[in-house]
Amino acid sequence: MEKKIVFSILCMLVIAGPVVSVAGTTIQDDINSRETTKNYGGSIQQITGKNCVMAGWSEIAKLIASDGATSDWFGYSVSISGDYAIAGAWYDDNSNGADAGAAYIFKRSGTSWMQEAKLTASDGAASDWFGCSVSLNGDYVVIGAYSDDTSSGSNAGSAYVFKRSGTSWTQEAKLTASDGAAYDYFGYSVSISGDYAIAGANGDNNGNGAEAGAAYIFKRSGTSWTQEAKLIASDGAAGDCFGCSVSISGDYAIAGAWYDDNSNGANAGSAYIFKRSGTSWTQEAKLIASDGAAGDCFGCSVSISGDYAIAGANGDDNGNGADAGAAYIFKRSGTSWTQEAKLIASDGAAGDCFGCSVSISGDYAIAGAPGDDNGNGAEAGAAYIFKRSGTSWTQEAKLIASDGAAGDYFGYSVSISGDYAIAGAPGDDNGNGAEAGAAYIFKRSGTSWKQEAKLIASDGAAYDAFGNSVSISGYYTVIGAFQDDNVYGNDAGSAYIFKRPIPDLDCSGTLSWTDVNPGETVSGQFLVANIGEPTSTLSWKIDLYPDWGTWSFTPSSGSGLTPEMGAITVGVEVTAPDQQNQQFTGEIKIVNSEDSNDYDTISVSLKTPVNQQSGNLQVLPFLMMRQNSMLGQLFMSSLVSTRIQNLK
């Protein structure tokens, strides 16, 4: 099978299990049969060497199931949050039956990642596909099993919430729709944020019609999770597939309906924003492209962060050509969500599928275009970074692999966190073999994004599909390779953890001034250094300083500080408050811009002198009352003499 055929399988818009990363949702392999294996044609190539450019990123762990087996597809879905990572293995055979599915939790301890738990459904059964979608947040994880047969019917679907307590993960709840029915595919997409979880059921039949789709919100109270709302489109219709993609952040949730027929045409697609008020979730907005058209599939991928939401429309025909693709940014103002920008590639072309994967974080958004033809070859793939400035979103960078080639499908999966972005290229041919796969890390410096590392598996092989799923958080990234052959058999699957060097902020010096006149400006300095791992880079800033006086720092922030550069000097100026005889104290807090838990403080003290004149005036009334006394006469004589001298 040629790569082009493989890519068409990967991006088909039919019901299948998607990956949900912590940053949003992506379209994933729509393969409904285990018949499709790595044997696309040709033979496994012998590994003759690696062509990995790490640039400080190092593979610190290969994650495989402690009890894996052939065709488990471990790593099909991944998510990472803090010191924990999860990988779904939706074809895992276990005590629940063949293809019942499982998910595995790994925890970081120092530089090691160890399996902490294998999660399976307490009531699972064969072909449930538990682990088709996963989302991890803090001590909670939600896992979809959209093929689960429940009391509501075959393939009604479900999702499961597990909670960590110490080193144990226990099932806290099974989530099902209160009105579920056969082939709802509840759990097809999932997302969790705080005490709330959302599960898409894009096959749900409701008042809007057959397979109109729905999504369900569940809330945690203690150890219980109860359905708080069923979300459906206010204007939905049969076949909309509402809930094909979901994302939740705080009091807001978004659900894509990629097959929605609307004023833009058949299958133009849409997405819906819902807001929580107390225990109610109400539709706040329907999002459609201002220039949408039939077959755009708007909403195929969605992500929400704060007041901003992004929706991919990988079938959009625009000036770049048919199916060039687009993504749309919407901003909340009060209760209104308005389209703030349409994102398209500055150099896009027909068939790029721009927007098949999206992620948004703060003022930055990323969209994958795995079908992009560029200097690397046909369908080498690309991803595009856009930055917000006021109400404008402009393309800041086009990301392509430094060593890309035709059929890499770079941008098939994407994730962004702070100044770092990652893009998967599951079709990459490298030292590990044909279509072994790779992922690429890019870092922002000012307005530039540069490739910092190419990541490949240390033991990869042909057709592993490394990079089919990615998630990045802080200093760590997890990458799925669901077709990896390992000790457990063909297509057992794996996931890999990579880490970038961690900086360590260290500040030294003291700032102490005495006898400073009110309104006087004094200066001092302290040192900022990175004492972290070699080759690590530190971005830092002044976070807090005393609320007395007027302060200035030179510089007040910095980036790119390595241990090899040594300490830099920060100059400090402060204008003393207009108060006499006062002792002012406090501290300056300097933080690692990427890790608020990494900070240091500098102690500060400033003392103004006693106002002698003020002290004389305080005793004057007392002595004037006694001016006939010897002491009073002496004092008055001295005071008059001082006044005369001052007049001179």
Image (cartoon, grey):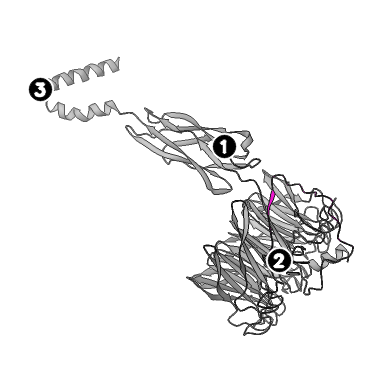
Give the quadrant of residue 125.
Answer: bottom right
Amino acid at the residue labelled 1: Ala
Q: Nearer the viewer, mark 2 or mark 1?
A: 2
> How far apart in space, not on screen, are marks 2 and 1 (Cα)?
41 Å
Q: Give the labeled residue for mark 2.
A: 74
Q: Secondary structure at mark 1?
A: strand
Give the side of residue 291 with respect to residue 534, left or right: right
Q: Secondary structure at mark 3?
A: loop
Amino acid at the residue labelled 2: Phe
> How far apart in space, not on screen, are marks 1 and 3 (Cα)?
66 Å
In this rendered view, identify the residue nearer to me: 637 or 51.
51
Dot 1 surroundings within 10 Å: few (below 14), some, or many (20 or more)?
many
Q: Give the labeled residue for mark 3.
A: 629
Q: Percent position (x, y) of residue 374?
A: 84, 53
Secondary structure mostly seen in the magenta stretch:
loop
Give the quadrant of residue 65.
Answer: bottom right
Q: Which residues are magenta?
A: 42-65
In this rendered view, identify the residue nearer to me: 82 or 190.
82
Q: Percent position (x, y) of residue 634?
A: 15, 18
Give the quadrant of residue 130.
Answer: bottom right
Q: Nearer the viewer, mark 1 or mark 3?
A: 1
- Look at 68% across and 46% down and name the residue there: 444
Taking 30 as reference, is 445 above or below it?
A: above
Dot 2 surroundings within 10 Å: few (below 14), some, or many (20 or more)?
many
> How far apart in space, not on screen, are marks 2 and 3 (Cα)?
100 Å
Q: Give the labeled residue for mark 1.
A: 529
Residue 285 visible? The answer is no
Count of residue discs:
3
Q: Percent position (x, y) of residue 1?
A: 88, 66
Say if mark 1 contacts mark 3, CB within 8 Å.
no
